[in-house]
Image (cartoon, rainbow, N blue to C red):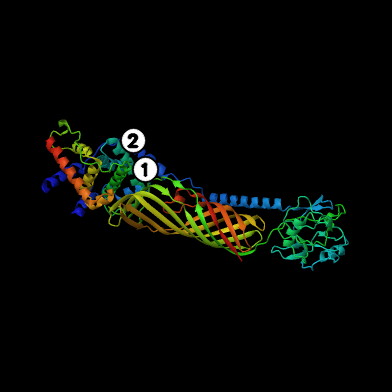
């Protein structure tokens, strides 16, 4: 199940290792062609900013991580062989960069249970009644960092609890517990909103 | 319940699937700056410049040694009269026109060189001063310029050094006994007269054979004279070295987060390897060396051997295993060991029986044998070994002092500077700070 989700996440870009991130294009970026690198940045940055924001909550910090992640991506581009999804590969770099940031700031330390958070106003909800990613982002941002991280890694990125436990240095059971509590809180908030 | 969870997950997943947000132009500006900084060539001197610099440094060290040596062993040999006054300086002979063993001299025996002088119609000698060669064996060089005479004893100068082998005058014998005793340690009573040349040869003087000036000192007063020179022990041969090295450049140093991975892999998942290593703290580099040193010349020696070096450090970072699983730890022990072969050339600056000063320069090539990361994750420990390709060359130079306890055993201390070339080795104090100062110390066993 985990592998299936992971594959879905990795192939979400649909580039299949090529597509808009063709080999020649990646090769140009790898060779340091600044124009190509900028094009790649323009393609990826808007998506990756959402990813970063999911992990850190605020816009300014998300852009700091975005910048750091892109520098890492371009300098590590030679380790991408082209065999898999480029966007999936890139996504991992940004997830790792975000995790590094959270660790540096000691944000992943267990802060106890989820506190009641400042909540959405009714005008945050889209006219159609559907919650947009912005509303959902606000909800996620309202979660404590360790809950937010586990939720993001499991639900959106598709990591297993074992992987999350290894990456965050926590027990697998703790990962499950935090995910469960995050889900419950999000459900509660969504219910209240609707 | 599961359906609710599944729906919730699906809600978030779909909402973020193609979600985008506007990115500030400042981000690309920052990325661009960061890339420019990352791709900027390190301030690494070109190879030729490095070698030129090292050659200059080595030349300077040798020049310093020569300078110091020539100061201690004056090339202009002073001539003394009976009053101990310098009456003339004579340039030391630099060429050997004839070499021949001469019999030990007694007061009235003419030497071979004296005969030569006599044959040339010059001062009739009764004895000659010979020169010792590099290994200290006495020989009577025919170009000797001073001939001792029993009738004209020589008074040591006030500046006489304890190592100098001179002939005291009978009336001053009591006051110069210490000088004489030192000289006797170096001189066989039956040995021919000799003196040091600039190569540091040993002095040979016969107490019973005072000196008179040779043809070179014809312009000097006719009173008897002597050359005063220093004696330095000759130590040609092979010695074994066993020592240890403590490297410099201690301390904590943060480098840019490293992302290392085994080359050749790579797919949608990150390749196996170490990622985001940062917050490096370096331990004391320690080396042990077993070597051999060959003194092939009075002043020159070459040494080589095998060195074993440990480079401990700690950092934080992430390890991605072969299955793509990521493990983070803020306590990673990074342990590296190298085995290497140094090659050094030594130049003796000054030496005495008890101590010797020298300078040295050389190169070493080392190869990593262990490059191990140990993750401390609570009580769990995960070890990952990463193979290292290539070698780590370095060049160094330094000065050293050799304390001689016995003829066969001495203690050496070699402070030195070393430069490690950038050869894509794993991060260590050598890669972060390639120029290092270190201190070697050990024992030398002579044969």
Horizontal and vertical percent for residue B25?
32, 35
Q: What element carries label 2?
A: helix
1 or 2: mark nearer the eye:
2
In this rendering, position of residue B172 left or right of residue B4: right
Task: Name, please, the residue furthest toward the front.
Answer: B174
Query: Which of B419 and A9 lies nearest the eye of the viewer?
Result: B419
Mark 2 crowdedness (10 Å alpha carbons): few <14, some 14-19, many ≥20:
few
- Tell which subunit mark 1 falls on: A
Q: Distance between the residues labelled 1 and 2?
A: 16 Å
Q: Are marks 1 and 2 in contact (CB under 8 Å)?
A: no
Q: In this view, does B85 lie above or below B180?
A: above
Return the mark for residue B303.
none
Return the mark for residue A34.
1
Asked where in the image residue B142 lies, by quadrant, the reply is bottom right
Horizontal and vertical percent for residue B9?
16, 45
In this rendering, position of residue A49 left or right of residue B204: left
Q: Looking at the rendering, in which quadrant would you find the C terminus of chain B?
A: bottom right
What residue lies at 33% left-to-right and 35% top-to-bottom?
Answer: B26
What residue lies at 62% left-to-right and 50% top-to-bottom?
Answer: B60
Horizontal and vertical percent for residue B446?
60, 64
Residue A3 is at least partly visible in this image: yes
Q: What element carries label 1?
A: helix
Horizontal and vertical percent for residue A28?
35, 47
Residue A17 is at least partly visible in this image: no
The residue wearing badge 2 is B26
Query: Which of A12 and B93 lies nearest the eye of the viewer?
Result: B93
In this rendering, position of residue B312 left or right of residue B79: left
Marks 1 and 2 belong to one chain: no
- Tell which subunit mark 2 falls on: B
Asked where in the image residue B147 lies, by quadrant, the reply is bottom right
Mark 1 crowdedness (10 Å alpha carbons): few <14, some 14-19, many ≥20:
some
């Amino acid at each position: 199940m985990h592998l299936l989700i992971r594959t879905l996440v990795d192939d979400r870009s649909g580039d299949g290792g090529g597509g808009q991130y063709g080999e020649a294009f990646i090769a140009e970026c790898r060779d340091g062609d600044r124009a190509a690198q900028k094009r790649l940045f323009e393609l990826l940055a808007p998506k990756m900013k959402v990813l970063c924001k999911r992990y850190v909550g605020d816009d300014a910090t998300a852009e700091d991580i975005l910048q750091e992640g892109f520098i890492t991506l371009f300098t590590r581009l030679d380790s991408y062989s082209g065999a898999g999804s480029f966007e999936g590969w890139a996504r991992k770099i940004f997830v790792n960069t975000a995790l590094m940031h959270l660790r540096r700031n000691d944000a992943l330390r267990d802060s106890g249970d989820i506190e009641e958070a400042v909540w959405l106003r009714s005008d945050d909800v889209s006219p159609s009644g559907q919650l947009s990613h912005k509303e959902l982002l606000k909800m996620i941002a309202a979660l404590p960092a360790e809950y937010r991280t586990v939720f993001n890694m499991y639900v959106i990125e598709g990591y297993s609890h074992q992987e999350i436990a290894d990456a965050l240095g926590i027990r697998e059971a703790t990962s499950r517990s935090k995910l469960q509590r995050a889900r419950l809180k999000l459900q509660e908030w969504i219910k209240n909103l609707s | 319940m599961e359906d609710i969870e599944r729906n919730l997950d699906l809600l978030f997943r779909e909402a973020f699937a193609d979600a985008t947000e506007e990115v500030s132009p400042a981000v690309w500006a920052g990325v661009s700056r960061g890339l420019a900084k990352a791709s900027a060539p390190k301030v690494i001197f070109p190879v030729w410049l490095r070698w030129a610099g090292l050659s200059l440094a080595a030349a300077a060290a040798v020049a310093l040694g020569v300078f110091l040596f020539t100061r201690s062993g004056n090339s202009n040999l002073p001539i003394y009269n009976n009053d101990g006054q310098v009456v003339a300086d004579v340039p030391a002979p630099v060429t050997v026109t004839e070499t021949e063993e001469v019999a030990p001299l007694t007061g009235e025996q003419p030497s071979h060189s004296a005969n030569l002088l006599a044959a040339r119609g010059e001062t009739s000698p009764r004895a000659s001063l010979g020169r010792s060669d590099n290994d200290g064996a006495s020989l009577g060089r025919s170009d000797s310029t001073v001939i001792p005479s029993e009738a004209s004893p020589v008074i040591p100068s006030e500046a006489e050094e304890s190592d100098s082998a001179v002939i005291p005058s009978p009336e001053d014998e009591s006051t110069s006994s210490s000088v004489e005793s030192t000289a006797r340690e170096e001189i066989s009573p039956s040995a021919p007269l000799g003196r040091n040349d600039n190569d540091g040869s040993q002095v040979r003087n016969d107490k019973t054979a005072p000196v008179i000036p040779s043809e070179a000192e014809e312009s000097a007063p006719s009173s008897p004279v002597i050359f005063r020179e220093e004696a330095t022990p000759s130590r040609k041969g092979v010695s074994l070295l066993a020592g240890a090295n403590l490297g410099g450049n201690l301390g904590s140093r943060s480098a840019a987060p490293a992302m290392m991975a085994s080359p050749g892999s790579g797919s949608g998942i990150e390749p196996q390897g170490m990622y985001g290593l940062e917050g490096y703290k370096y331990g004391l580099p320690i080396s042990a060396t077993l070597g051999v040193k060959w003194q092939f010349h009075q002043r020159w020696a070459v040494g080589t051997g095998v060195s074993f070096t440990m480079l401990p450090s700690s950092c934080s970072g992430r390890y991605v295993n072969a299955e793509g699983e990521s493990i983070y730890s803020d306590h990673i022990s990074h342990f590296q060991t190298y085995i290497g072969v140094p090659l050094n050339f030594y130049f003796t600056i000054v030496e005495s029986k008890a101590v010797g000063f020298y300078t040295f320069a050389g190169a070493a090539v080392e190869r990593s044998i262990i490059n191990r990361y140990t993750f401390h994750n609570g009580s769990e420990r995960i070890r990952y070994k990463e193979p290292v390709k290539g070698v780590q060359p370095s060049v160094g130079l330094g000065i050293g002092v050799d304390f001689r306890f016995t003829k066969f055993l001495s203690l050496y201390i070699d402070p030195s500077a070393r430069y490690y070339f950038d050869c894509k080795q794993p991060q260590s104090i050598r890669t972060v700070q390639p120029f290092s100062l270190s201190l070697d110390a050990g024992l030398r066993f002579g044969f």
